[in-house]
Image (cartoon, rainbow, N blue to C red):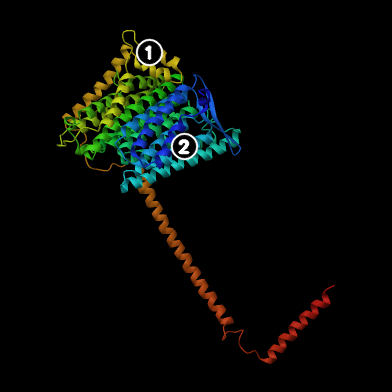
Amino acid sequence: MIEALYDVSPAWPVIIAGLIAAAVPNHHVRKGLALIAPVLAGFLWFNVPSGVHTGGIIELGGFTLETFRYDGLSRIWGLIFIIAAFINALYGLHSRDRVGDASGLIYAGAGLGAVFAGDLLSLFFFWELTAISSVFLIWGSKTNEAYKAGLRYLAIHVLSGVMLLAGAVIHSADTGSWAFDESLSVNTLGGFLIFLAFGIKCAFPFLHNWLQDAYPKATVTGAVVLSAFTTKLAVYALARGYAGTDMLIWIGAVMTAFPVFFAVVENDLRKVLSYSLNNQLGFMVVGIGVGTELAINGAAAHAFVHIIYKALLFMSMGAVLYRVGTVKASELGGLFKTMPATAIFCIIGAASISAFPLFSGFVAKAMTLAAVAHEGHYIVWFILLFASAGVLEHSGIKIPYFAFFAHDKGHRVREAPVNMLMAMGIAALMCVYLGWPDMFGIPGGYRALYNLTPFPEVANEYPMWTFDHVVGQMQLLLAALFAFAFLVRMKWYPDEKRSINLDFDWVYRRALDGTARWGHAMFGRLWASIGNVLAAARTRIGGRLFQAFSPMGAISRDIPSGMLAIWTSALLAIVLIIAYIAP
């Protein structure tokens, strides 16, 4: 019986639970399904023997679909997706939105299915399912802005799926294989299309605006769920198919740097977290681009801890939004007085994302930085250092400072609901545990993380807790803290303003929109001109035909008998000549 479960992907219990939840009106049944499904998925994940396992084979329409590939890479992503699904379900227990419950489960299950997919067709199915199911988490806000953002979100992600399918078909035609593995290459048309499909979901520079557009407009629970799966699935896909691709190093470096400037001036704190998410993805992409075992370990470990601490930050801001009704920095402050537990959890998440020693971000980000320096990419290494200081400023300080401490706005609201606090507590505990060092001969929690990485032997050999490493990181963080305090004290720090900050989406939402409108107007004029010409020609030809065939026309006129005799004689002569000449 147990061996029969080896071939069952952990994705199926979660997806099936989502489909059942969509049909069940009872709130308690849906919440029970949401909590039980990740537990069943975890059992299936834990039950698989160590090593590489291939199963879940489905024969369909002449294609062989591999729905359960379990190896070092899919193992760590699968586990963190299962943990995230459970924490998200716990966080959303207060919600009575049936569509949100169902779509959240299907979305999480689709993410798991894509992680364990062994071929490009299976990947495409789950890839599109993540897009279709997740958009309801945005529309669940039931605002006009959320509806429009959801349409844009859906369009860009369906485009990603179309490019993935087109690339997969071309790749299969070139290689004769549908395998989803390291055989992909950006140097072929099919491989490049797949690379772009992954890049859209990973929010590459100039393709990133769907993230900042949609996530802040999602529901309180929806933003937490969205932060866990889509972009980290794309990171996994890049690690699976494009590890060691040099262009990813510079793409990732740009991703780490540019969000810092937008996050500093952004007023919406959930949008700040969205830019911060972009920043953190850049570290993972750089690690995949470097492609060494240490770098891949760094990217995988970073994705694992990032899902936890980013969810914790989104949960804390979601609790603020739930109680206060806004997450605008200009309208918050002083909430630590009535939401102290949420404030503490937010600070733990902030310390983790900032990579403070003793927190999870420190033990993960360090491997990527070390791998980049070891391979001689010193310019990129300095960019990552700048980005590390920047993430402390906008996520490590700005989020908790402006939400809970700065300029008290007089909001006296209740603490977050118990289920929210429980979810945040679990995430906060993991942030501390996974960053804890070896002490008194007892292995630290970070060892558990390192043992989950694709190359655990390499990870465990990395000298994490050295004096130079710890002191160097603390110097960087303290310098960033001092800079923030100095700017605030001198009143040079950008004020929180109710404003809209322009990003690259201005190009296609304004410039391209204007171009499209101009083109539509020009086409309209051209079509009108063609219509005028055709109308004139129709009038002219119609007039000639009327003159010829109307009762008063030339054909209807009386023809003199003499003229008729002449024409008859001429036609008869022509016929006789032809008959004479013909053989």
Q: Which mark is residue 127?
A: 2
Q: How many marks?
A: 2
List x then y, in percent, for residue 226: 36, 36
User: Quarter-wise, where is residue 359 in the image?
Assistant: top left
Name the residue at 49% across, 68% down. 533
User: Quarter-wise, where is residue 448 in the image?
Assistant: top left
**What crowding class fits label 2: few (fewer than 14 Cα within 10 Å), some (14-19), or many (20 or more)?**
many
Name the residue at 83% across, 77% down. 580
Type of the residue with mark 2: Trp
User: Quarter-wise, where is residue 452 in the image?
Assistant: top left
List x then y, in percent, for residue 341: 22, 27
Picture quarter with the C terminus: bottom right
Q: Secondary structure at mark 2?
A: helix
Q: Which mark is residue 463?
A: 1
Towards the viewer: 361 or 6 = 6
Up the image or down, 128 lies above or below 144; here it is above
N-term-proximal mark, 2 vs 1? 2
Type of the residue with mark 1: Pro
